[in-house]
Image: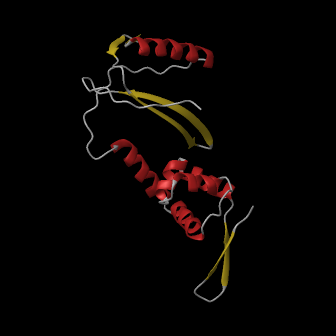
Amino acid sequence: MRIYIFREKKDNTIQKNCMTPEELRKHRLKLGLSIKEMSELLSTPYRTYQDWEHGRRRIPGICQEAVLCFLHCRGAVKKRFKRKKKKGGKHMGKERVLFKTEEPKSARDTAAFLRLLADKLEAGTISLKGGGQEVTLDIPANITLEIKVEEETKKAKIKKSLEIEIEWYPGDGDDQGGVTIA
């Protein structure tokens, strides 16, 4: 599917621009941005941008032009999102890592670890040991669960990640909420 955008140039000739959903995706990956970041950059709702990439909606000419401009100033776009990722919000507190490990595991071993972690989470206490480190956490009855799926392109390779983050403020009351797995 090709979408054609016609615009009049200064010399009164007509120039035809077109961008396919595949080209839009290729340009986004060239910029090193996720769908969410690209939709933010274009000031467009996430779902709308996703529909453009999947060919369910026409890509507006102004957005096609903006994407081409972003490609010309690629470095500035990348810097903007690196800075945003590092800084986070305006009022960041001090962060101290209490425990960290990263190791390759099979999907089966990872699933077994997550099952054990889920049991400990439900029991209210998690103890983690490894690499000379040890930390014990008392988990309250209600917590905040954040799930994020990302796709990152580096040197023509695509890396996907699923991040599960569990947060709470010690001493806070019981906030009610719910997450379901579809």
In the picture, measured across the screen, residue 133 lies left or right of residue 62, that is left
User: Is residue 155 at all visible to an observer of this figure?
Assistant: yes
Quadrant position of residue 13: bottom right
Q: Position of residue 163 (x, y in %)?
A: 49, 31
**Image position, residue 35 (x, y; %):** 55, 49
Judged left or right of residue 121, residue 157 is right
Please, which colouring scheme is shown? secondary structure
Q: Quick one: 170 or 102, which is closer to the camera?
A: 170
Q: Residue 30 location, x and y as percent?
A: 58, 52
Question: Is residue 15 placed above or below 69 in the rendered structure?
Answer: below
User: In which quadrant of the rendered image does the N terminus lie?
Assistant: bottom right
Instruction: Return the residue nearer the eye: 15 or 142.
Output: 142
Q: Residue at x 67, y 83 (%)?
A: 14
Is 99 on the left or on the right of 49, as rendered? left
Q: Residue 85's quadrant in the figure?
A: top left
Q: Could you tell me residue 83's position as x and y percent?
A: 37, 48
Number of numbered callouts drawn:
0
- Residue 145, picture quadrant: top left
Residue at image coords 54%, 60%: 71
Q: Residue shown at 43%/50% (left/top)?
A: 81
- Residue with the most extreme right position: 1
Taking the view exactly as shown, the residue that stands out farthest to the bottom is: 12
Q: Is residue 127 visible?
A: no
Given residues 79 and 166, the one toward you in this image is 166
Report the residue at 33% width, 12% height from top: 136
Dividing the image into 4 quarters, which one contains the C terminus?
top right
Left or right of 2 on screen, residue 88: left
